Amino acid sequence: GAVVSQHPSWVICKSGTSVKIECRSLDFQATTMFWYRQFPKQSLMLMATSNEGSKATYEQGVEKDKFLINHASLTLSTLTVTSAHPEDSSFYICSAKQVVNTEAFFGQGTRLTVV
Amino acid sequence: AQSVTQPDIHITVSEGASLELRCNYSYGATPYLFWYVQSPGQGLQLLLKYFSGDTLVQGIKGFEAEFKRSQSSFNLRKPSVHWSDAAEYFCAVAGSAGNKLTFGGGTRVLVKP
């Protein structure tokens, strides 16, 4: 099956700093990647959709200047949380799909803790 | 807009007993439906999916789900639960196979010995 890898698996950062999370498709080229956020004991909420080589599409209520998404290649998308605050602490999960009408595959997630 | 409801927040079941998790969706056209399982602190593992065809879908780990269009439901079942099935289960819907997913609130399954 298709493998999607996220790095790091967990990260702790100080309030006010920025942190970058990588999402890689290891054995396929991902035309589209999705970024989700999951608060403790809650469901997953889509943050944004990124297509390779174009700007990400953010869901309503998601600050695009705070959550910077870059999908510069067909195997890598990055999510940068800028000027992180404790309320940004969450579990971030990406998924990636290859072409139209194929299912997306999930990474293992990144636990972000802002102190 | 599409939406998913999982009416049961928690379910406790004895090991060896059967399990059924409910999922109701709202979507204007034919939905693409998924069930995922998540262990604490882990990512999502796909249990099964329904795109078209046979409405009874077999998945991994002995799970199955039935798509009922008339009831807008996609309930997940397992005949005999194992202690390792204790986890959070999410139902999700998409407008196409690889489109963005809308998740239900999740159902936490506890397994009693």
Image (cartoon, coloured by chain):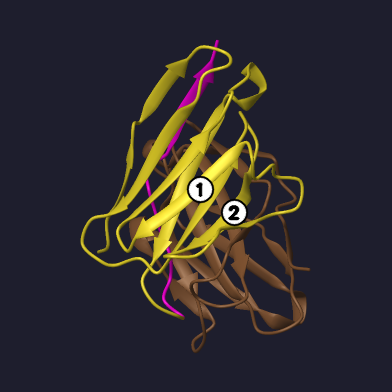
- Disc 2 or 1, which lies upstream in sequence? 2
Mark 2 vs mark 1, foreground winner is: 1
Residue B113 visible in the current orientation: no
Decide: is B71 above or below B62: below
Read off the magenta span.
Answer: A101-115
Report the side of B64 relative to A72 (left or right). Answer: right
Q: Are marks 2 and 1 in contact (CB under 8 Å)?
A: yes
Identify the residue at the far bottom of this view.
B53
Measured as percent of width and height from the top left, residue A51 is found at 47, 65
Q: Looking at the figure, which quarter contains the C terminus of chain B? A: top left
Q: Residue at x 41, y 37 (%)?
A: A21
Q: Label 2: state its secondary structure.
A: strand
Circle 2 residue = A48
Decide: is A13 above or below A62: above
In the picture, which chain is yellow? A
Q: Are marks 2 and 1 on the same chain?
A: yes
Q: Quadrant of residue A84?
A: top right
Q: Quadrant of residue B10?
A: top right
Q: Residue at x 62, y 26 (%)?
A: A88
Circle 1 residue = A69
- Give me the chain letter of mark 1: A
Residue type, label 2: Ala
Assess disc 2: are there few (<14), some (14-19) or many (≥20) residues with their C-alpha within 10 Å of its C-alpha. Answer: many
Decide: is A52 above or below B107: below
Determine if the magenta segment contains residue B93.
Answer: no
Determine if the magenta segment contains residue A103.
Answer: yes
Q: Residue at x 47, y 16 (%)?
A: A13
* Alpha-carbon span between mark 2 and mark 1: 8 Å
Which hue is chain B drawn in?
A: brown
Assess disc 1: are there few (<14), some (14-19) or many (≥20) residues with their C-alpha within 10 Å of its C-alpha. Answer: many
Q: Residue at x 52, y 86 (%)?
A: B52
